[in-house]
């Protein structure tokens, strides 16, 4: 087993990194090796060669600072692993100056737009969908519309990540307690409350699934028409098509992560504490959640006026 393979195996078994993260790390390390071709890997892990590789990423690959910093972070983690294993004597990446990246504010949809979508576009509840269909094409098309809707509703109502949505199973639902169990990063389990409308949406989807999916091949909550689990590209496509069909209220970027941002921003604007939002989103630390404070200046102003000892108080009139 190569050093890279051993490291990827280590972050999977010991650090509990997701398969997607392991794929990204593996691709970054492979690209670094390909850049130096047949050179000895350990000999290339020096400050001078790392600087040359960083220049290559910035000037030849034309990667932005965020992407370059990802490469550097992966290499730093790899070097830390090699240091603990005794293959190198120090981590040279620690001495590398990283390019400064601009702060990106999260994109989100307005709460009014999301509420309008959730309240007025439930074709199943209205009875617009006939689920007693005969042709395969009709069954497939109708099921795709039902699946698109529940994907958007679950992503927005719970704020879960795309991978977490794909990983949901039927047994993760607890309708009696109005909760859903979500397995997040690092195999950490968390409970997320389900609002009544979300419970209704899930129930309607399950009715459609029972009628239209002929053979269930997975214990996943959400299934493809084939009866198998979802995959990332399909979730992305479902969100783009579903929100794209709603008109100009959802112009711009359409992705599962934007729905996650939208819930977090909405919770903050409604007065939810950052720690509570952190628990719902499954963030490892509060710093990841604090980015939403930059998206909601109105809520910050409200908190400031309520908490500041001098805010909102009239200045005494001079005698």
Image (tube, grey):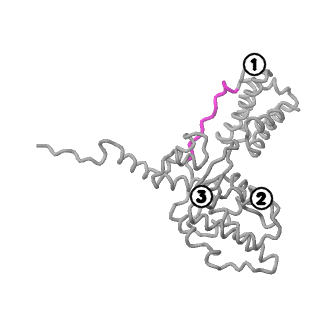
CA–CA distance in space, label 1 to label 3: 54 Å
Can residue 259 be seen in the rendering of this structure?
no
Name the one closer to the observer, 61 or 103.
103
User: In the rendered view of the protein, which quadrant contains the N terminus?
Assistant: top right
* Circle 1 residue: 89
**Quarter of the view holding residue 79:** top right
Q: Nearer the viewer, mark 1 or mark 3?
A: 3
- x 52%, y 60%: residue: 110
CA–CA distance in space, label 3 to label 2: 21 Å
* Circle 2 residue: 219
Q: Which residues are magenta?
A: 93-104
Q: Position of residue 272 (x, y in %)?
A: 48, 51
Q: Of marks 1 and 3, which one's residue comes earlier in the chain? A: 1
Q: Of marks 3 and 2, which one's residue comes earlier in the chain? A: 3
Q: Of marks 1 and 2, which one's residue comes earlier in the chain? A: 1
- x 55%, y 64%: residue: 114
- Where disc 1 sits, the SS reads loop
- x 83%, y 27%: residue: 41
In the drawing, does residue 152 fall left or right of residue 213? left
User: In the rendered view of the protein, which quadrant contains the C terminus?
Assistant: top left
**Quarter of the view holding residue 29:** top right
Q: Position of residue 62 (x, y in %)?
A: 70, 42
Can residue 97 be seen in the rendering of this structure?
yes
* Circle 3 residue: 177
In the drawing, does residue 158 fall left or right of residue 274? right
Q: Any magenta on residue 98?
A: yes
- Where disc 3 sits, the SS reads loop
- Where disc 2 sits, the SS reads loop
């Amino acid at each position: 087993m190569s050093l890279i393979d051993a490291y990827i195996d280590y972050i999977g078994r010991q650090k509990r990194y997701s398969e997607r993260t392991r794929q990204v790390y593996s691709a970054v390390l492979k690209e670094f090796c390909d850049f130096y071709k047949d050179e000895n890997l350990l000999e290339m892990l020096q400050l001078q060669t790392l600087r040359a590789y960083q220049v290559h990423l910035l000037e030849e690959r034309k990667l932005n600072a965020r992407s370059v910093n990802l490469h550097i972070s992966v290499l730093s983690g790899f070097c830390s692993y090699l240091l603990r294993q005794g293959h190198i004597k120090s981590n040279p990446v620690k001495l590398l100056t990283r390019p400064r990246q601009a702060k990106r504010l999260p994109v989100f949809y307005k709460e009014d737009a999301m509420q309008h979508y959730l309240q007025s576009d439930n074709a199943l509840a209205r009875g617009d969908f006939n689920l007693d269909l005969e042709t395969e094409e009709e069954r497939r098309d109708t099921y795709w519309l039902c699946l698109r809707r529940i994907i958007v509703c679950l992503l927005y109502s719970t704020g879960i990540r795309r991978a977490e949505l794909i990983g949901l199973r039927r047994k993760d639902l607890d309708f009696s307690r109005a909760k859903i169990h979500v397995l997040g990063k690092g195999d950490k389990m968390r409970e997320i409350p389900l609002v009544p409308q979300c419970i209704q949406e899930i129930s309607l989807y399950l009715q459609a699934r029972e009628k239209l999916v002929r053979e269930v091949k997975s214990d996943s909550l959400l299934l493809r028409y084939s009866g198998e689990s979802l995959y990332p590209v399909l979730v992305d496509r479902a969100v783009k098509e579903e929100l794209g069909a709603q008109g100009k209220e959802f112009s711009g970027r359409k992705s599962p992560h934007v729905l996650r941002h939208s819930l977090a921003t909405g919770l903050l604007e409604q007065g939810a504490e950052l720690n509570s939002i952190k628990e719902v989103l499954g963030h490892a630390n509060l710093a990841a959640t604090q980015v939403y404070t930059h998206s909601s200046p109105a809520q910050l102003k409200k908190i400031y006026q309520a908490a500041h000892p001098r805010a909102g108080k009239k200045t005494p009139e001079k005698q």
